[in-house]
Image (spheres, rainbow, N blue to C red):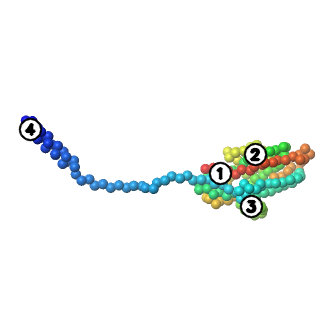
Amino acid sequence: ITFLAVLAGILLSGVVVLTTSHAVFSDTAASDGNYFATGDVDLTDELENATVLFEVDDMVPGQAEERCIEVTYLGSLDPDLVKVYSGGATDDGLAEWLAVTIEQGVGGNYADCSGFGGQSTIFDGSMDDFLADHTDYASGVGSWDPSAAGEKRTYRITVVFDENAPDTTQGASLTDLSFVWEVQS
């Protein structure tokens, strides 16, 4: 009986091996070379931070100064709005007597605002208010929403010394004034 049990076990295991070992067809597909890379936001101006926009000495009440600056978006991402805000200044009583208007449009450049057009006013108030109320991207002003690299806008900034400024403004100054253009995605 033991011999028969062993023989039956061997035969049964042979049947199991024969029924489970058969040919199988196979194929694969692969996705090779995958990668991830970040885009960028890149904003530049024609001055490249090398030259100041305004250098005005001996202002008198009623005097107006105007400058243009062209800003270019060079990034690869579709960003949010480009905004302008104050990067700070040193004021000894002149800012409240300076009216500032900031317009965005096209045409004109740093050396010459002629040809500037298609504009919209994005700020019109006192320099004092601009310095106090517009200090970062969240509080900045602007409505330009670049859609592609190479797109440009010109900003015209006009500063007028109030003709009714008191004699106490003689010798006053506003220095280290910084206008900042920022874009985020």
Mark 4 or mark 3: whose residue is earlier in sequence: 4
Q: Secondary structure at mark 2?
A: strand
Q: Which residue is mark 1?
A: 183
Q: Please name which of the two marks, 2 or 3, marks the residue nearer to the observer.
A: 2
Per the model, the C-alpha gap separating discs 4 and 3 is: 105 Å
Per the model, the C-alpha gap separating discs 4 and 1 is: 88 Å
Amino acid residing under circle 2: Gly
Q: Mark 4–mark 2 contact, CB under 8 Å?
A: no
Q: Is residue 139 left or right of residue 90?
A: left
Q: Is residue 113 left or right of residue 73?
A: right
Q: Which residue is mark 4?
A: 3
Where residue 114 appears, as percent x and y from the top left, is 77, 63
Per the model, the C-alpha gap separating discs 3 and 1 is: 20 Å
Q: Which residue is mark 2?
A: 88
Amino acid residing under circle 4: Phe
Give 77 or 88, whichever is nearer the viewer: 88
Q: Quadrant of residue 11?
A: top left
Please tell me which residue is depicted at 78% across the width and 52% down the height of the picture: 101
The image's mark for residue 109 is 3
Q: Is residue 30 above or below residue 13?
A: below
Q: Please name which of the two marks, 4 or 1, marks the residue nearer to the observer.
A: 4
Mark 4 or mark 2: whose residue is earlier in sequence: 4
Q: Secondary structure at mark 1?
A: strand
Per the model, the C-alpha gap separating discs 2 and 3 is: 24 Å
Q: Residue furthest top?
A: 1
Total tally of numbered discs in the picture? 4
